[in-house]
Image (cartoon, rainbow, N blue to C red):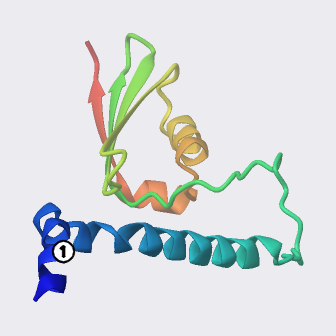
Amino acid sequence: MRRLRSLYPLKSLGLEFWLPLPILAIAFWSGGAAIADKILQRSYYVTTPIQANAQVQEQPTKVILSIGVEIKYHRGFSKVKVKTANSALKKLEFEFPFTEVSQIEVALSRELGLSLEQIQKTVHYQVDFR
């Protein structure tokens, strides 16, 4: 009974909870250090070297919904509006300094990276003579 009364100040301060915490902290610290040392001492061999200065010329695939060409015949230029299904680019607008259909199709083919047949299938022309 006397022994329990001598431990009463420890219980009232909550020291029976706080005293084991430094021991647990040291255990976690030493265990974490040991694991980190093992991981950091591993040697990693790279089979293929990384090229840091290589430039990727890959363009995202474009899904063309429609191509509308408005030819301003007397003004000497053509306006092109392209609607795409990509999430980043919904609309593209071009302005070409010529009014001939064949030149417009070649320029669109070059700009969009599509074949002439694909351009001809989706293009719609509107000629303005004002």
* Residue extending farthest front: 2
Nearer to the camera, 5 or 42: 5
Position above or below: 122 against 10: above
Please identify the quarter of the rendering in which residue 116 is found: bottom right
Residue name at image x 57 percent, y 59 percent: 115
* Residue extending farthest bottom: 1
Q: Quadrant of the N terminus?
A: bottom left
Q: Quadrant of the C terminus?
A: top left
Residue name at image x 46 percent, y 73 percent: 23
Please identify the quarter of the rendering in which residue 41 is found: bottom right
Position above or below: 1 against 36: below
Nearer to the camera, 91 or 75: 91
Q: Position of residue 100 (x, y in %)?
A: 50, 31
Q: Position of residue 61 (x, y in %)?
A: 49, 61
Query: Relative to residue 16, is residue 31 drawn left or right?
Result: right
Residue name at image x 16 percent, y 61 percent: 13
**Number of callouts:** 1
Query: Relative to residue 90, is residue 99 drawn left or right?
Result: right
Please identify the quarter of the rendering in which residue 48 is found: bottom right
Label 1 sits on residue:
6
Q: Residues within 10 Å of mark 1 (few under 14, many from 20)?
A: few
Q: Considering the numbered disc 1 on the image, is that residue within a helix, a strand or a loop? A: helix
Position above or below: 108 against 16: above
Kind of residue indicated by mark 1: Ser
Nearer to the camera, 129 or 110: 110
Position above or below: 35 against 52: below
Residue name at image x 89 percent, y 77 percent: 45
Q: Position of residue 64 (x, y in %)?
A: 37, 56
Q: Position of residue 129 (x, y in %)?
A: 28, 18
